[in-house]
Amino acid sequence: LHAFVGVGFVVGSFLVQPFLPQEQDDATTVCPGFNDNSTKNEEFQHTIIGNIPSINWPYIIIGVWHFLTAFGMITLGISRIEMPRYSSEYSGEKSSKFTNVKFWKTLFVMIYFYYFFSCGLEGFFMSMTYTYGLCGPLQMPPTEAGWLNSLYYGAFVFGRLLGIVISRYLEPATIIFASLSGCVTSALVLSILAGSSKIGLYLGTFVLGFSLAFLFASGI
């Protein structure tokens, strides 16, 4: 299930590609200070497809897909089809085991911050890759900046799928340590190369997406 979250990200990144502006000059109205000769109040004109601006189409398609998914969930709820159960209900004695762990409150706080930072980085970075590529030092064309999202999400899905196999052979602590090492390595690559090299930016983005993919499931 965690892997298929990434699959949706990948599909979405490819879905939006055909509707993005194709020329570098189209970014002048998006990035402040991108072109000193451009007019600040200049209004960007999107391509029109079916009397609708092209950039609106990805949102329309995804919105329709969400509507169909919601309709399917409502149908399942009305039909009263029971989901398969793979374990028996926990008794009250078993459910209270966690509170018997010494320093369980401290452990709970540490787990909270673990997911706060790991999932926070996962969401924040993926939302900023396109903007950095488009408006950062490399000033990439919209299509090339869009490939950063596809690369990040592709590495994320690959990591999630690979994690299913790796988790059978390695302890969660080992996987988390390796993932965090990958995150630090990618941060160094991005800090040193991302501002001057497209290859460095793509490489760091791939490594970070791959490394982050293991943290959520391993923590559980």
Image: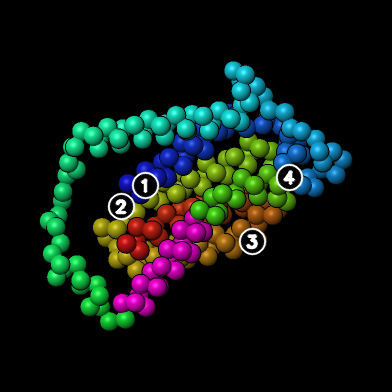
Query: What's the distance in space between the residues labelled 2 and 4, CA to CA?
Result: 40 Å
Q: What element does badge 4 sit on?
A: loop
Front of the two marks 1 and 4: 4
Among numbered discs 4 and 3, the one appearing first in the sequence: 4
The residue positioned farthest toward the bottom in the image shown: 102
User: In which image quadrant can residue 47 be found?
Assistant: top right
Q: Which residues are magenta?
A: 104-122
Asked if the magenta segment contains residue 56, the reply would be no
Residue placed under numbered mark 1 in the picture: 3
Q: Label 3 amino acid? A: Ser
Query: Label 2 vs label 3: CA separation?
Result: 31 Å
Q: Which residue is mark 3?
A: 191
Q: Closer to the observer: label 4 or label 3?
A: 4
Q: Check if mark 4's residue and mark 3's residue have beta carbons within 8 Å.
A: no
Tell me what residue is drawn at x 84 percent, y 38 percent: 39
Location of residue 158 with respect to 44 vertically, above or below: below
Q: Earlier in the sequence, mark 2 or mark 4?
A: 4
| x 63%, y 26%: residue | 53
- Which disc is residue 96 wearing? none
Compare residues 202 and 50 and report the one nearer the observer: 50
- Quarter location, residue 139: top right
